Image (spheres, rainbow, N blue to C red):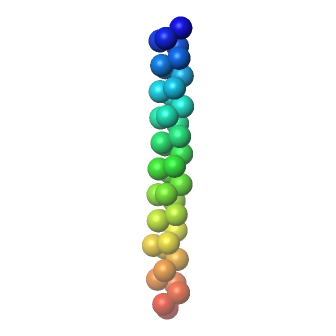
Amino acid sequence: MFVVDYLSKNILIQTTYNITHNISYNISYNVCVALPTLFV
């Protein structure tokens, strides 16, 4: 049971990390794309 518990927590942490990383990357990418259009 310990191995299953460890794996499920590990998957959950990895998924959460990936989602937050993707969201922050998308936000920063959108800001970099949107900022130049504001100054044009």
Q: Which of 16 and 33 lies nearest the eye of the viewer?
A: 16
Instruction: Give the vertical position of 9 relative to 3 (above or below).
Output: below
List x then y, in percent, for residue 40: 49, 91
Q: Where in the figure is residue 9, as x and y percent of width and height?
A: 51, 26
Query: Is 1 above or below relative to 33?
Result: above
Residue 3: x and y in percent read: 47, 12
Q: Count the labels in the image.
A: 0
**Towards the viewer: 40 or 13:** 13
In the image, what residue occupies the spot 53% across and 87% down?
38
Q: Nearer the viewer, residue 27 or 5?
A: 5
In this view, which residue lies farthest toward the bottom? 40
Residue extending furthest toward the front: 2
**Residue at point 52%, 36% (across, down):** 15
- Residue at 47% x, 35% y is 14
Residue in the picture at 53% in, 8% down: 1
Q: Is residue 12 above or below residue 32?
A: above
Q: Residue furthest top?
A: 1
Q: Position of residue 36 (x, y in %)?
A: 46, 83
